[in-house]
Amino acid sequence: MDRICSQCHAQFANETKADWCPACGGALVDRPALDTTGISAADMGAIDHRGIVLPRRHALGGVITPQ
């Protein structure tokens, strides 16, 4: 299960204990993982001090966005 903000759609680490988004104040909701491998995006990406999962970066710069 992934935790996302219902307002700004930021993704949070599973160990985040907040009930609201520290970025915008929206409610956090649980949703099933979108990929079929069973690995949460929170396990794959870097996590900032607020518990928000940061997008993966390309070696040459820029953000890798999912298709």
Image: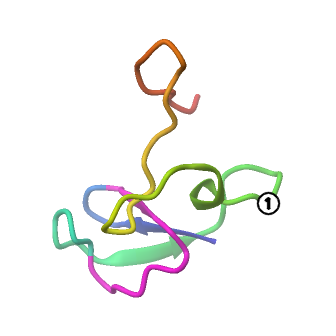
| Residue at the far top in the pictured view | 60
Give the image location of residue 55, x and y in percent: 46, 41
Give the image location of residue 23, x and y in percent: 20, 63
Is the residue 45 above or below the residue 67 in the image? below
Within the magenta stretch, is there residue 58? no
Main SS of the magenta part reads loop
Is the residue 53 above or below the residue 57 in the image? below
Within the magenta stretch, is there residue 13? yes
Q: Amino acid at mark 1?
A: Gly
Q: Quadrant of residue 14?
A: bottom right
The 10 Å Cα crowd at callout 1, few under 14, some 14 to 19, many 20 or more, is few
Q: Which image quadrant: the N terminus?
A: bottom right
Left or right: 35 as drawn, with respect to 21: right
Q: Quadrant of residue 63?
A: top left
Q: Residue at x 25, y 62 (%)?
A: 7
* Residue linked to disc 1: 38
Q: Residue at x 31, y 68 (%)?
A: 50
- Colour pattern: rainbow
Give the image location of residue 65, x and y in percent: 50, 30
Q: Residue at x 58, y 28 (%)?
A: 67
Residues shaded magenta: 9-20
| Residue at the far right in the pictured view | 37
- Mark 1 secondary-structure assignment: loop
Query: How many marks on residues?
Result: 1
Q: Residue at x 37, y 76 (%)?
A: 28
